[in-house]
Image (tube, grey):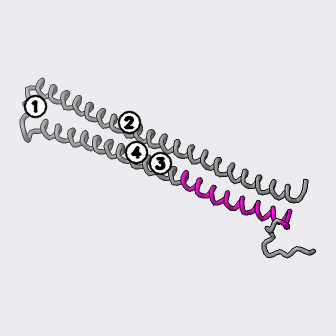
């Protein structure tokens, strides 16, 4: 192979290497975007599970209140009289149930917020991967052009180097 052919081959392989870098980064970016979607879905599932816990807490509260009302009625007490011991017990039970419900709602909100935050980080990483790959590709092409000038300086790619004649 002559010097000119080697110089051209150097530039072509540099361009092909740069293209491969960009494509690899795009594939990585696609993977990160898919992971971001998966993260958001997981957050929604966690939120749904937390809401189910809240519903379970309310169902449990309903059972406790019904059982207390039945016991009080069976013992000849007015279960709905205001200010009595059964009423105070019912209020305490409701307070506990509402606390559990609010905790479950907070957990659901937190799960969604965290999944969105993590997904955002993954999307940013995807964008950065492509940007950095483009910069690296530019450097690779520049290096291959420089190497071509080193291989075959008569093409004019000598930089500051002077050729000895």
Give the labeled residue for mark 3: 119
Q: Is residue 156 above or below residue 83?
A: below
Q: Residue at x 49, y 45 (%)?
A: 36
Residue 53 x %, y %: 34, 36
How packed is label 3: few (under 14 Cα within 10 Å), some, or many (20 or more)? many
Q: Which residues are magenta?
A: 125-154
Q: CA distance from mark 4 to mark 1?
A: 40 Å
Q: Is residue 60 left or right of residue 160?
A: left
> Does residue 71 appear to the left or right of 11 in the view shown?
left
Judging by the rendered image, the residue that carries numbered circle 4 is 111
Q: Which residue is mark 1?
A: 79
User: In the rendering, at what x and y percent does residue 78 appear?
Assistant: 7, 30
- From the image, state whether disc 3 or disc 4 is nearer to you: 3
Q: Report the front residue among 152 and 29.
A: 152
Cα distance between the residues tagged 3 and 2: 20 Å
Q: Residue at x 47, y 42 (%)?
A: 37
Q: Secondary structure at mark 4?
A: helix
């Amino acid at each position: 192979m002559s010097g000119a052919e080697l110089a051209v081959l150097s530039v072509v392989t540099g361009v092909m290497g740069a293209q491969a870098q960009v494509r690899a980064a795009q594939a990585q970016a696609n993977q990160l975007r898919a992971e971001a979607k998966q993260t958001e879905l997981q957050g929604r599932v966690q939120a749904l599970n937390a809401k189910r816990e809240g519903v379970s807490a309310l169902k449990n509260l309903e059972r406790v209140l019904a059982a207390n009302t039945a016991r009080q009625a069976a013992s000849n007490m007015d279960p709905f009289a205001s200010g009595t011991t059964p009423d105070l017990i019912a209020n305490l039970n409701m307070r506990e149930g509402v606390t559990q419900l609010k905790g479950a709602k907070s957990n659901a909100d937190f799960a969604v917020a965290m999944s969105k935050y993590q997904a955002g980080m993954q999307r940013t990483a995807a964008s950065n991967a492509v940007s950095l790959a483009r910069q690296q590709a530019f450097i690779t092409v520049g290096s291959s052009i420089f190497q071509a000038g080193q291989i075959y300086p008569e093409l004019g790619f000598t930089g500051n180097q002077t050729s000895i004649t």
